[in-house]
Amino acid sequence: MFDTPFDRQADQVAEERRAQHIAEILDGSDPEEGVRLADRPLMPRRKRLWLGIALVAAVLAAWWLIGSKPEATATAGPPVVTAAHPLQREITEWDEFVGRFEASRSVEVRPQVSGEITRVHFTDGQFVQQGAPLFTIDSRTYRAALAEARAEDARAESALALSKDNLARAQRLVSEDAIAGTEIDRLEAEVRNDAAVLTAAKARVSARALDVGFTTVRAPISGRISDRRIDAGNLVSGGGGSSATLLTTINAVDPVYFEFTGSEALFLKARREGLEKGTPVEIRLQDEAEYRWHGALDFTDNGLDGQSGTIRARAVVQNGDGFLAPGLFGRMRLATGGKHQALLIPDTAIVTDQTRKLVLVVEKGGTVASRPVELGPLVGQLRVIERGIKPSDRVIIKGTQMAMPGQKVTAQNGRIEVAAPAGDKAREAPAAIPASSASLAS
């Protein structure tokens, strides 16, 4: 098979047997079959060699498949998790509200006299001081009326002086019985009448002077003015009230009010905790992460809305730079829970089991146990745990998806930290709601 002397001898013996077989066939009844066998060559030696190698390989493969044993699989170790003790910090609990800023005072500017607007003294949107001129109305007719009233006043003064002199002369004649007593009475009545006429004339002078003063429309309060509704050259009607022409509006923006509504439950909570006027509040705008605006509770309505079950309230906020504008949306928090020590863990470490909230802890020996907890408000990314765990518990903060109660785990030591607050630049930039929140006490 492998071209050795033994193989060559075997081939020779096979050739002799083949020749003998052919001779037997030739001696038989089918000589053609013997001829075909004689002409058929033997299998080449190289081909026989490869056939033998294939046979040996097949035997070895069968032996490996049948006789070899599978390697034992390595046993997987317990899952690796990160555990840490709860963070202990003093926190301040807040109740959160949503509201809008409103002007502390808002005035519609309307003329008190009629006439033509001759001049506008302000730029739309500017800040104006109380008493600053805003509009000028043509005052010529009112000045003429004032001059007429002053003339009537002078005439009344002259008439009163004459009646007083007549009464004085008549009183000197009474002692000489040169005048009747009734004449004295008439002269005294004339003096009183002329005095009343003079008083009326002076009142008309004052009224006409006021009309002249009203021809210059001045700012009734300090604040930011709106745009002008009437340009110079237009006629306006006065007289006061809603029938007078609206010229513009002014909003007082320092301070401003933050108006909000609270539920009945929050109202009762605040009342029982003694929160009254002057309680500090903190507010942040829609694009701000920090509560950078500070104020104080200023007003609470005298009753709840029977339909919505809410009550209106208001806080006053200082706005010296005028940045806060009426109508801005904001979130306000009101400290209602005081300061107390609390345990905090990452909000991602809390597991939900149907209606229960659970925390996984690593006990002695590396066994996982579940603890039902009562959640408090959020402090950044950390959740306050009111009940259910102790400061000595090792809470799984990473790998909760690989841990099961009763399972052994390999716990690595971790640490719970408070996220760094926003930078100074974020504080300076002008940047259904939960009922409560909390922050770390300073």
Image (cartoon, rainbow, N blue to C red):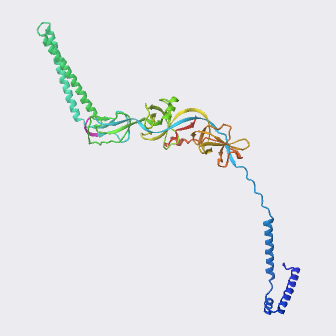
Residue 177 at x, y percent in the picture: 12, 7
The residue at 25%/27% (across/down) is 206
Residue 40 location in percent, x, y?
79, 88
Q: Is residue 349 above or below residue 147?
A: below
* 159 lies left or right of 36: left
Q: Is residue 442 left or right of residue 253?
A: right
The range drawn in magenta is 112-118
Specify the farthest residue to the left: 178
Look at 80% across and 75% down and name the residue there.
53
On whether residue 114 falls in the magenta region, the answer is: yes
As rendered, which of 235 and 46 lies closer to the eye? 46
Question: Residue 225: where, in percent of width, then height?
Answer: 37, 39
Name the residue nearer the viewer: 284 or 69. Answer: 69
Residue 17: quadrant of the picture: bottom right
- The answer to whether one can see residue 365 in this image is yes
Q: For residue 247, which quarter of the picture?
A: top left
